[in-house]
Image (cartoon, helix red, strand yellow):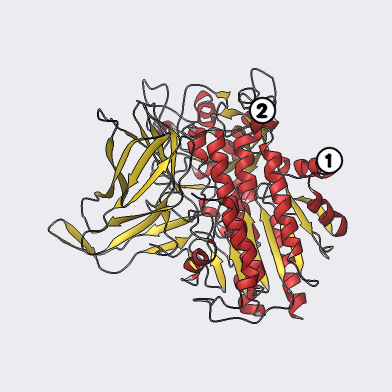
Amino acid sequence: MFQLRDLRRRAALCAAVLGVVALAGCGGDPEPVDSRVVVLGFDGMDPVLARRWMDEGKLPNFSRLAEEGHFQELGTSNPPQSPVAWSSFATGKGPGEHGIFDFLRRNPETYTPNFSISENIPPDRFIKLFGLQVPLGSGEVLNRRQGEAFWVKAERDEGARASVLRIPVTYPPDDIHRMLSGMGVPDLLGTQGTYTYYTTTRLGDAGSSTRTVRVRPDRQGRIESEFEGPPDPLLESGEPMTVPLVLEPAEGGALVQLGDDEVSLEPGEWSDWIRVAFDVTGPVSVTGTVRLLLVQGYPSPRLYVSPIQIDPENPAVEIASPSGYAAELVEDIGLFHTIGMPEETWSLNEEHISDAAWLEMEKTILAEREAMWFETLDKNDSELVVGAFVQTDRVTHMFYRGLDEQHPRHADTAPEHRDEVEWIYREADRILGETMDRLGPDDRLIVISDHGFAPFRKAVHLNRWLVDNGYLVLEEGATESDVIFSNVDWSRSRAYALGLNGLFLNLAGREGQGIVAADEVEALKAEISAGLAEWTDPESGEPVVRRVFDGEAAYRGPERGDAPDMVVGYHRGYRASWQTTLGAIPKPLMEPNRQKWSGDHCIDPALVPGVLFSNFTPEVEIGGIRDVWQLTRRQIREDES
């Protein structure tokens, strides 16, 4: 059974075995470096919470770093979303230059949302014969972020070898000394994390990240089903490849057979990694890795199967640079999650798994990340080391309800889970301390977060506000609309919301069915902004929107063509609803957020700054996350000189 201590033990042993372990694919054994610039990210670390627990003596290593070096708030991006902020961190540019404005980007022709970080371009030529399609050439994966990352510049301009681990918006990987891609890496289905849930009972509608399979046991309790993988790439029909899945009663739980593997699980227990081979038509197979959770035992079993990770030893697409680096990591620390956002927050939001089970998964991911982080530091073969731990962000998203007594889900959060945000900050402090212990006397350390946090108490249906105020018009007889504006009359609609902060005009000549003329734009934006500024919560009288930013003014640069026309900065406690992000229009104007995703940061950026710590005093003023790029490059140049 999988043990977290195994990863930490392996990480601790790395320094002792470096002399005999070959750096496969990394060009032999590089000479140790004399000094390094180490940039350590804790996604979502909030300065207010950090100060509170530093003052209470709960974060001794952060306190020591602040006292001996430097600590300040760090301005975030606009909007304060992780892919936007980390892109600014990497490039030193704003969204108008690097082109990432949200987790989602819209297709103006069809009004549909797409993933903003990366894009898969399939082969454009096939031979089709007898139901098969044989590609002529290979496809391509593009990182949609524009602008050169500072680690690429450091290698080229300063000759500084760079090791970059799990930084968001780094898929596909850059061709540098060492990189493991972060946010953007898909699962084997090509999504950002689709899990499968087997149940004997009927469930309501689930989210788009969920595949729910209803199963029936025979008289002995045996369940025979299939586990679906990706579509067979050689079949014109796109039929998915499958492996058999069998579930049957066992003492204390259930026996699960998945493909060629068999595992016995008790309720609430996670399996170790299982490698699943999907046979492509012909002599080829594609492998992925999954973990199983027996959510509930017999007589009504429920089985959770994680998203299918790209197998790091046999990757279907490149997730690391050099190409053998992911497999090398497996040799050092064992199998690990490869998907860019592995914390399966939606399964907890849908309450398909428990708080305890989700936290156990989070501890596993955290242990994997620190094992590879410490392994990299112990190699001491890179002048620049950059890594991010996103667990501070994910735990705060899901357990802010424990901190916030006003949240609708605070009362039903078990007492033992109300301090989970403090727990993950303590874990960050432990990782920081172990990092500091590994630094040489001339190493420079920079610790950052991309944004802070706020409570998410009420979900705001921005498209409903646009309907109620006459800017977005439903088709005759419709009172609401499903995702992607299914019931919208575009011939009469002037504005729409999509994504977490974006508001777009239905501009003639740009949108597929645009009607707003160019000479109407400024007046329409001013009118909508004024209306949003007056919007108050009918229950509390509090304002809902703090600021509305004009996209034309906020985003300068060659990529602003994809930018929203207006950016909505919500007040603390409010955030765009999940329905808004995908272009749906429910009947309510707003409603209590009754989901476990209870903290957020997609509000006015002034309300959610991040943090900056360093073991030296910066010589230049650092106002925001895009300035860290220049700070880091300055330290690299000083080392080289």
Around disc 1, counting alpha carbons within 10 Å, would you say few (fewer than 14), some (14 to 19), or many (20 or more)?
few
Q: Nearer the viewer, residue 343 or 266?
A: 266
Residue 415 shows which numbered tag? 2
| Number of numbered discs on residues | 2
Q: Which residue is mark 1?
A: 56
Residue 557: horizontal and vertical position, in percent? 60, 59
Above or below for 326 versus 344: below
Whether label 1 touches label 2, CB < 8 Å:
no
Q: Position of residue 291 (x, y in %)?
A: 44, 47
Q: Position of residue 403 (x, y in %)?
A: 70, 32
- Quarter of the figure with the C terminus: bottom right
Q: Amino acid at mark 2?
A: Pro
> Taking 442 as reference, is 547 left or right?
left
**Is 396 on the left or on the right of 561, as rendered?**
right
Q: Is residue 75 visible?
A: no
Mark 1 or 2: in front is 2
Q: Nearer the viewer, residue 192 or 12?
A: 12
Q: Secondary structure at mark 2?
A: helix
Residue for point 29% across, 61% down: 285
Name the residue located 64 percent from the left edge and 75 percent from the top edge. 381
Look at label 1 and name its amino acid.
Glu
- Mark 1 and mark 2: span between their CA atoms? 21 Å
